[in-house]
């Protein structure tokens, strides 16, 4: 007997441990089944489960469980990422608390500390994923720095280098002066700050009292100026082009060049060029052959390339000193307030400095070409489709990818330097020494490059390195390409695009395999962000972070999973509230109570029962609705419309089965003939059994518990059961339409009763006018049922016009008439509705006025504007409903 209440904490750990112990999650490379592969985006080994993880892993698990039930050999490949900078920061902070530094410890011992920390704390997020019900093949768990993946990383680097697609170059990079490493554009956060725009006069060489005025937001970089640019069509400066300006503090001669980069409408129209400390200036400098002078050290303090008075000053101190000196020299023209965007490191939180330095780069432009073509040809589909436009735009404008990082934790660059600077890139140190000896004709001492590779470099290989590449393993042949990648849009470029580039290049083996077989995945499903209930991004500073583990403790894992799926509409951010999760805990309770009702009424699963032979209309109806629901759920999951799947299941479970079917079945179960009772008991048990199959991918724990308790199963598990394939032969259209008509009639009457404030105990007579033969037949068969469910005193047909004080409802060709004159105070009710309608009209007017204000829409936070739009939509829907109710009263 099922317990009176469903307690998630009693069943979740039990079922998960059993699933894992019995190998329910394992893929089988020798199976005859068709494979289905999802590569788990490897969470950072430093991490713990947050709501973004909960969403992406829930959606992946739904797909894996669904396809496993559809008979596929499902591999969900798990693992973790070494998260170079993030992990190093965690370990260094722990060392700082003890007064230690990595430099004091040395590289080898520091790396030992990191590995110790990884062993101690690195499994936290994987344990939490188990709490979420993630059915990944944990026997195949990988780590981006395990031996096999490290071999793959070295091979990719070496091969790309020897193919000319990885190279060393002195270029401008985003330098993090706190972490002392280059970071990618994608790891830079732009923030708007209130700053100043300084206008400085630079004297023109050989011309007394002739100046060119430049405007800058960063006076500290003036120490590295090597040119001035003006627009070639700017008449104000035409005579200056080709002449030389003098930087007053350094005395450096600055060539004045004509370049489209200079904007005549911005500042003074003349812009100082500092090629070593600005990305745009770097390109201008290359075009015009300007000198590149790096004036900052790795701490972003002024170095020896600047005048001695500025040596070792911070950027802020150098700025203040330069402005004061320029003003004292009479070269400060004016200062304006100026809002500007500043780049911050997303991990360090400090202002990033464009810095000229030697780094390793990947020719991303070349690797991007087939990755672009793969999406254009449909070999890889991006869902929702609007993300394809974003993908193409970024890939078409991709820049060289800086893959070297000046930290210690990560894959060390497999490059060695000879005393003369000659570089040897090989798989091992021994191979590098052998190559050097061949080159020089004798043995030489080599020095290993100290840099490590960008974390995303190794992650880019995840779809094939985890399957054993570079070895030609059976797993690689079977599970690559993957079927779908599920991820957030925030790593579309960090990770997805780079997996496309690397997968096509290395699995395509330089054209040996067609493009369609070398892509890493056939579909990419991009889900949106999880925000709080007001649409704001979750952050600790706002205090609106929701912890998935806490929510699981409070409401159960299934309630959280079902909520996330139900809200995961394509292209729309999720607004998550605890109330929604609580509501879906109630959904789970409703399912449990329905199963308990079935059990208490003797509804037992009969293996010989064929629902297609049912005689009772309500049984043929519920079987038809179940079959169509199963088809809708399957179609929705195939197209990644998780919310449609969840909503279809919710509607059937709560509305059709729990509310209507059980209500309609009660009279049969308590007073009908024995044959009808037996059929209804068998139908209820059969429908409930198939329903828990359909629900399982979304709510695995409660369904597995019900599967175990509601029938003898011989030790089988729901997770390994087959998806019920209920075709057209299970649908009886006449029975479905007949009972749905009853449901519609009762629902319409109940709705009017609620709108008009009819007391629940009041019985109202129903008159039906204009009924056709079909409606008359249905009322004859179900009039008593309608009367009971809609709380009516009677049902009769009429040809007379509706009496005064009656409310009318149109259902198909018939008019349902409810005489309410003696039941409610019509005038009072009309006044109440008019008052509420006027209030709504006022609210709608205020919101419309606010949204019509272009300044509000432009300046207010996005979530605030969206909230106003939603309020307008809700108010308009309520207004429509009130207007309809008033219209009904108009003729009463």
Image (cartoon, rainbow, N blue to C red):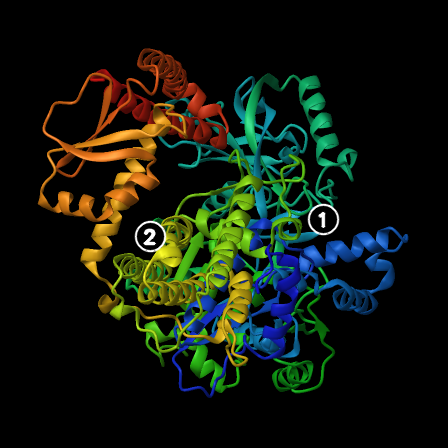
Query: Which image quarter: residue 43?
Result: bottom right
Instruction: Tell whether 407 sits left or right of 399.
Output: right
Asked whether 717 or 205 is in front, the reply is: 717
Residue sitting at 26 percent across and 48 percent down?
740
Q: Is residue 426 visible?
A: no
Give how far across and how far down residue 822 sits, in percent.
Answer: 30, 18
Q: Secondary structure at mark 1?
A: loop
Front label number (1 vs 2): 2
Asked whether 598 or 798 is in front, the reply is: 798
Residue 797 drawn above or below residue 853:
below
Question: Which residue is disc 1 drawn over?
Answer: 298
Instruction: Tell whether 401 sits left or right of 108.
Output: left
Question: Which residue is disc 2 drawn over?
Answer: 385
Residue 850 drawn above or below residue 23:
above
Q: Is residue 232 visible?
A: yes
Asked whether 132 or 519 is in front, the reply is: 132
Sequence-first disc among 1 and 2: 1
Q: Residues within 10 Å of mark 1 (few under 14, many from 20)?
A: some
Give how far across and how far down residue 478 sits, in percent.
Answer: 43, 82
Give how far across and how far down residue 237 sits, in percent.
Answer: 42, 25
Residue sitting at 52 percent across and 54 percent down?
561
């Amino acid at each position: 007997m099922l317990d009176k209440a469903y307690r998630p904490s009693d069943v979740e750990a039990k079922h998960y441990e059993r699933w894992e112990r019995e190998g329910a999650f394992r893929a089988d490379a020798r199976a005859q089944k068709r494979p289905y592969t999802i590569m788990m985006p490897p969470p950072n080994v430093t991490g713990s489960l947050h709501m973004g993880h909960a969403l992406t892993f829930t959606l992946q698990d739904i797909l894996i469980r669904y396809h496993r039930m559809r008979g596929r050999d499902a591999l969900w490949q798990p693992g973790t990422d070494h998260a170079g900078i993030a992990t190093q920061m965690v370990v260094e902070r722990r060392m700082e608390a003890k007064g230690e530094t990595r430099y004091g410890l040395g590289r080898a011992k520091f790396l030992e500390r990191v590995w110790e920390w990884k062993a101690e704390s690195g499994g936290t997020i994987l344990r939490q994923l188990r709490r979420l019900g993630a059915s990944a093949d944990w026997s195949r768990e990988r780590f981006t720095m395990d031996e096999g993946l490290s071999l793959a990383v070295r091979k990719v680097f070496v091969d790309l280098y020897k193919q000319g697609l990885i190279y060393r170059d002195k270029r401008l990079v985003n330098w993090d002066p706190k972490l002392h490493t280059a970071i990618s554009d994608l790891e830079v956060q732009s923030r708007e700050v209130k700053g100043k725009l300084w206008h400085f006069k630079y004297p023109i060489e050989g011309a007394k009292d002739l100046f060119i005025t430049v405007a800058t937001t960063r006076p500290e970089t003036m120490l590295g100026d090597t040119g001035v640019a003006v627009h070639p069509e700017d008449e104000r400066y035409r005579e200056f082009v080709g002449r030389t300006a003098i930087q007053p503090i350094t005395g450096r001669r600055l060539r004045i060049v004509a370049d489209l980069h200079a904007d005549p409408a911005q500042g003074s129209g003349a812009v100082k060029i500092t090629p070593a400390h600005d990305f745009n200036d770097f390109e201008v400098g290359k075009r015009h052959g300007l000198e590149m002078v790096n004036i900052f050290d790795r701490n972003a303090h002024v170095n020896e390339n600047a005048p001695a008075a500025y040596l070792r000053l911070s950027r802020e101190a150098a700025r203040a000193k330069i402005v004061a000196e320029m003003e004292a020299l009479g070269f400060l023209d004016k200062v304006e307030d100026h809002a500007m965007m500043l780049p911050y490191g997303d991990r360090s939180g400090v202002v990033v400095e464009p810095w000229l330095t030697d780094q390793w780069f990947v020719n991303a432009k070349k690797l991007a070409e087939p990755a672009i073509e793969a999406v254009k040809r449909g070999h890889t589909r991006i869902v929702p489709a609007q993300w394809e436009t974003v993908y193409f735009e970024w890939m078409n404008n991709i820049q060289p990818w800086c893959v070297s990082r000046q930290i210690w934790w990560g894959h060390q660059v497999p490059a060695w330097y000879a005393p003369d600077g000659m570089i040897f890139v090989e798989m091992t140190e021994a191979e590098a020494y052998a190559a050097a000896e061949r080159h020089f004709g004798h043995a030489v001492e080599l020095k290993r490059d100290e840099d490590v590779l960008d974390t995303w470099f190794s992650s880019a290989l995840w779809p094939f390195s985890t399957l054993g590449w570079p070895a030609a393993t059976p797993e690689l042949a079977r599970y690559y390409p993957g079927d779908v990648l599920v991820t957030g849009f925030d790593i579309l470029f960090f990770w997805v695009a780079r997996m496309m580039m690397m997968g096509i290049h290395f699995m395509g083996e330089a054209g040996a395999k067609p493009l369609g077989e070398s892509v890493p995945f056939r579909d990419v499903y991009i889900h949106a962000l999880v925000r709080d209930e007001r649409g704001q991004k979750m952050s600790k500073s706002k205090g609106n972070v929701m912890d998935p583990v806490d929510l699981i403790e409070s409401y159960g894992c299934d309630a959280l999973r079902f909520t996330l799926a139900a809200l995961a509409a394509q292209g729309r951010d999720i607004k998550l509230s605890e109330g929604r999760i609580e509501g879906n805990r109630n959904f789970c309770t409703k399912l449990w109570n329905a199963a308990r009702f079935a059990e208490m009424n003797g509804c037992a699963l009969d293996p010989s029962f064929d629902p297609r032979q049912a005689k009772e209309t309500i049984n043929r109806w519920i079987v038809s609705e179940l079959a169509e629901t199963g088809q809708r759920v399957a179609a929705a999951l195939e197209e990644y419309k998780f919310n449609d799947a969840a909503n279809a299941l919710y509607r059937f479970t709560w509305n059709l089965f729990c509310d209507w079917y059980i209500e309609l079945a009660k009279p049969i179960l308590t007073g009908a003939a024995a044959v009808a009772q037996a059929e209804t008991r068998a139908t209820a048990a059969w429908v409930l059994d198939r329903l828990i199959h359909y629900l399982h991918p979304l709510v695995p724990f409660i369904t597995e518990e019900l599967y175990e308790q509601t029938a003898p199963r011989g030790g089988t598990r729901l997770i390994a059961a087959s998806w019920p394939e209920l075709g057209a032969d299970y649908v009886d259209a006449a029975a479905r339409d007949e009972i749905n008509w009853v449901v519609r009639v009762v629902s319409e009457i109940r709705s009017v009763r609620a709108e008009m404030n009819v007391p629940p105990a009041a019985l109202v007579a129903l008159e039906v006018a204009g009924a056709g033969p079909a409606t008359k037949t249905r009322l004859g068969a179900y009039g008593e049922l309608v009367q009971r469910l809609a709380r009516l005193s009677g049902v009769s047909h009429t040809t007379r016009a509706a009496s005064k004080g009656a409310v009318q409802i149109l259902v198909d060709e018939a008019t349902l008439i409810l005489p309410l004159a003696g039941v409610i105070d019509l005038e009072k009710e009309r006044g109440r509705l008019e008052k509420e309608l006027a209030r709504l009209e006022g609210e709608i007017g205020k919101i419309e006025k606010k949204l019509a204000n272009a300044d509000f829409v432009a300046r207010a936070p996005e979530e605030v504007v969206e909230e106003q739009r939603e309020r307008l939509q809700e108010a308009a829907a309520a207004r429509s409903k009130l207007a309809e109710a008033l219209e009904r009263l108009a003729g009463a």
